[in-house]
Amino acid sequence: MTELLTVEDLRVALPVQGQMRTVIHQASFAIGPGEALGLIGESGSGKSMTARAVGRLLPAGAQVSGQIMFDGEPVLELAGAALRRYRTTDVAMIFQDPRAHINPVRTIGDFLTEGLRSTLGMRRRDADRKAVSLLAEVGVEDGERRLRQYPHQLSGGLLQRVMIASALVANPRLLLADEPTTALDVTTQSEVMGILDRLRRDHGVAMLFITHDLELATAVCDRISVLYAGTVVESQDAESLHAAPRHPYTAALLASRPSLTVRARRLPVIGGRPLAAFEAPEGCAFTERCRWASPVCEEGRPAPETHDHGQVNCHRTTELGILGSEAVVTEPVIAEPDKSSVQSRGQQP
Amino acid sequence: MTTLTLRRRALPRVARTDPGLGPVGWTAIGVIALLALIAVLAPWLAPHDPNNISLLDANLGSSGDHLLGTDASGRDLLSRLLVGARSSLIGPLLVVVLATALGLTVAIVSAWLGGWVDAVVSRILDILFAFPGVLLAVLVVAVFRAGLGAAVAALVIAYIPYIARTVRSAALREKSQPYITALTIQGVGAPAICVRHILANLMPLIVAQSTLTFGYAMVDLAAVSFLGLGVQPPTADWGVMVSTGQPSILNGYPQESLYASALIVLAVGAFNILGDRFTERSQRSTR
C-alpha cells in the first residue's frame, strides 16, 4: 500500500531560553489514504509538536530534521504558494480548544469560508452554501443563522462541530486532530467524537488522531503509535496493541487504566516521572521506569523491530514478546494526609 | 423549635460589563462634535471678515458688534476664533490619520515578519523616539517652507514611533493567539490574516490611541504655530492667536491669547477624556 503520509526519523528542536531543546527525538510513522492513526503519549511527549510539524506550524526558530512525505511530496521543503495549497487542500487541523482557535471578532461564516474564498477563489455564495451543508453534516441544523453568529454566541460543543466542519470544508486528504475532545465535557465529547469519526469515514479522510485516551484511540483508530519522550516506541494495529502490547511502556499504560469491570481500590501507576525528549538518556528513554530494564537497554536507542502487527522499539523485545499487566513497576504511593503537618501548618503565622 | 424562614432576597442585578462612555465621555463627544460643526460652518457663522483690519477698533472689549472684542489690529476675535477652528482641527486630524496609517502598517508588518525586519524597524523607531516633535518641525521647516503642511509632516514623523510601538506589541500578542495558527493551516495568506484578523482585533486599541494622539497633536501643532513654524499669520489659528496676542497681554488686553488658549484646552481636554474612555473599554474587551 502506498502511504499518504510518511514521517521518518522526525527530529524537532525548539529554542528555549537561547538553547535548543529536543522535543521530538525520533518519530517515525505512516498513514495510508483514509486510515486513522492514533498518536498516544503523556503530556510533553511531543504529540502536538508532531502534528504541528506535519502541518508546518512549528514556531519560528525550530530545527527540524528527518523527512515528512505527503503523497510523494517532501512537506518540509514546501514554500510559498505550494505550502499554502498544501495547507488548504491537503491537510486540515482540528484543535483542542475551539474557542481559542476561532477569531472572536469574525463571524462563524467568515471562519468557515475564509480558506475557500481567499485561497481557492470560491465565490461567497458558493462557499456559504458549502459551509451550510457541512454544518448540517456535523449536526448543526440552522446553518444559515449560525453563519452570521459570532463564536461567543455558540457553546463549546457547537463550536467544536463548527471546527470539524471548517476542517472538512476544503476536502482535505489528511486531518490532524489534536485532542479534539479534551476541552469538552464528557457527554459532548462522545457526541463530537462520533460526528468526527463518521464524517471522516464518509469523506474518506485520513486522520492523525492525537490523544492520551487509549480507549478512545482504540475505538476510532486503525493503528496506534505510542510516543514516549519524543520517540515512537511502538506502533501496532489498534486492536492488537490493546490486546498484545510489546513495549513495556505500552503494557504499563494499559495496566494503569481504570476498568469498568475490574474493581480496584487504587489504580496502579508507573513509578518515576515521564521524561521530556531533551532529558532522555543515551539508551532507551524508558529504561529507568522499566521492569525489564537490563544493562543492554542503556546501550543506544533501540531500533524498530518489525513483527506481524506492527513494530516496537525495545532492545529486549525478542526475549520478552507480548507483555502483560505485570509491566507496572511500582505500587501506587498515595500518601495519607499527614495530620500533624496540617496542624503545624495551621499554627504558622 | 423555631422555624427559620429564609426569605429569598432578590438577586442583585448583574452589573453591566460595559458601562459605556459615561456622562463625562458623552460630554466630551458633544464638545468635539460642536467644535467640528463650528469648523465646518465657520464662514457662515462668523459675523465679520476674520482678516479685516481696522486699526481704529483695536483692542475693543465685548460689545454688541464685537461679541468677544477685537485684537490689536482691530480684527473681530469671535470671527477669528470660529474660522481658526478649521486649521486648528484639520491639522491634528491630518497628523493622526497619517501617523496612525503609517505607524500601524509598519507595526503590523514588522510584528508579522519578525526576525531581522522587526529588529531593524524597532531600532529605527527607537532612534526616531529621540527627536522631540518640535525639533523635527524646525528641521522640516528648514528644508521646506514654514506652514501647516510642514508642521503636519514633522509631527507625523514624530508620532509614528508612538503609534507603531503600541500597535507592534499588541500585534505580537495577537499573532501568538491560537486562532492565527488555525487560519494558517486553513491556507489563509499572510496579508489576509494581517488585515482581516490582526487589524480587526486591534481596532479598539487603535481608536483609543489615535483619539489620545489627537489631543497631543493639537497641543504640539499649536506650539509649532506659536513658534511661527506652522500656520502663518494672518491666517486665523488658535496656536497663532496665542502667539500674536502676546504683546497685547502686556498692554492689558489678554483676550486674544486667553480665548484661543481656552479653546485649545477645551478641545484637548475633550479628546483626552474620550481617549481615556476608549482605552478603558479596549482594555476591558481584551481581558
Image: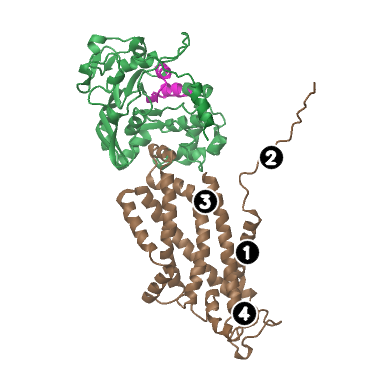
Chain colours: A green, B brown
The residue type indicated by label 3 comes to: Pro
- Percent from the top left, x then y, of residue A219? 42, 16
Q: Which residue is mark 2?
A: B13
Measure how far apart labels 1 and 3 are at the Cα level.
22 Å
Measure how far apart labels 4 and 1 are at the Cα level.
22 Å
* Membership of A208 in magenta stretch: yes
Taking the image as shown, residue B271 lies to the left or right of residue A102, namely right
The prevailing secondary structure element of the residues shown in magenta is helix
Q: Secondary structure at mark 4?
A: helix
Q: Which residues are magenta?
A: A195-219
- Marks 4 and 3: which is nearer the front? 4
Report the residue at 33% width, 21% height from top: A226
Taking the image as shown, residue A144 lies to the left or right of residue A224, namely right
Q: Is residue A70 visible?
A: no
Asked whether A54 or B273 is in front, the reply is B273
Q: Which residue is mark 3?
A: B204
Asked whether B151 or A91 is in front, the reply is B151
The residue type indicated by label 1 comes to: Val
Q: Are marks 4 and 2 in contact (CB under 8 Å)?
A: no
Measure how far apart labels 4 and 2 are at the Cα level.
52 Å
- Marks 1 and 2: which is nearer the front? 2
Q: What numbered label is drawn on residue B31? A: 1
Answer with the quarter of the image where residue B140 lies.
bottom left
Report the residue at 53% width, 72% height from top: B87
Sequence order check, earlier mark of 2 and 3: 2
- Percent from the top left, x then y, of residue A161? 49, 29
The residue type indicated by label 4 comes to: Gln
